[in-house]
Image (cartoon, rainbow, N blue to C red):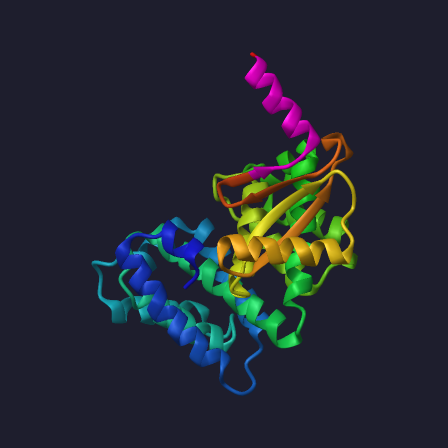
Amino acid sequence: MTQTTQTSLHAASREALAAAESRLAEVLGEAGTDPAALGGDLFAVVELLTGEIGLRRALGDGSSDPGARKRLATSLLTGKISAPALSVLETAVGQRWSSPRELVDGLESLGRSALLTSAEKAGNLDTVEDELFRIARIVVGKPELEQALSDQAAPAEAKRKLVRDLFGPKVQAVTLTLVEQVVARRSGRGVGFGLDQLVKLTAERRARSVAYIVSASALSGEQREQLAEKLQGIYGRPIALHVEVDPRLGGGLVVRVGDEVIDGSAAGRIAALRRQLA
């Protein structure tokens, strides 16, 4: 279970997700299982439960009979999603979740995990992480685009089409599926936030933290390596670097890791001096 998911769920749901993740790991280890297809199927279930309030409540009601919830899921979705996905879903709905909404959040987490497993097996998890970061920065940097993708009143398919038109030919299939899921889910938070969460999740998958770097000029490969090494020394763990270039800094870097900000830019030093003089 990722740290990001853990902190967003109540105790009962964390236990439920842990059980479902164990089943997911078993299914992914079976010969013939396609992780990307499994993840796509789980995302389809998330979309179904997001739109069908009654079904979501029936499958996520922790006070009802677990066997009845499993039978309901099986009767509705057999033949509509793959057998591996149905097996994971049956395990998930058989657990006791704190709320039906957290069941949906858990299924979304399982779908993401399956897709990232697909990227791992293909050897391109680094690429997916980088693509997600770049898409996040593009969306956040264009308020009109973020507003369009975050509009909860807009049809989900229209928003997915916009994502495909903008990024489809340029990124991995796994990246595209993950981004489409973020824009389709009515989470109540902006798409930029959801994309940043995906970047963190992907970095967690690689057992690393994420450092967001804003530099006045492009960094060479050697400079990136030196910076990553210094940050690893500071934080005691490997750090994934995501670098943006902003000439307005005037020089130097601004580094953000979690809630910590290291401002070594010329603009930052000038601002600090102004505060002291004031």
Q: Residue at x 74, y 52 (%)?
A: 167
Place of residue 212 in the rendered image (x, y in percent of width and height, measured from the top left): 61, 46
Q: Is the N terminus in the top left, top right, bottom left or bottom right quadrant? A: bottom left
In this view, the residue farthest toward the bottom is 31
- Image: magenta residue range: 262-277
**Residue 154 visible to the viewer:** no
Place of residue 13 in the rendered image (x, y in percent of width and height, measured from the top left): 31, 58
Q: Residue at x 56, y 50 (%)?
A: 182
Q: Relative to 250, is 175 on the left or the right? A: left
**Residue 245 visible to the viewer:** yes
Q: Image quarter for residue 92?
A: bottom left
Q: Relative to 200, is 124 on the left or the right? A: right
Q: Is the C terminus in the top left, top right, bottom left or bottom right quadrant? A: top right
Q: Is residue 141 above or below residue 38?
A: above
Q: Residue at x 66, y 23 (%)?
A: 270
Does the stretch in magenta take in 130? Answer: no
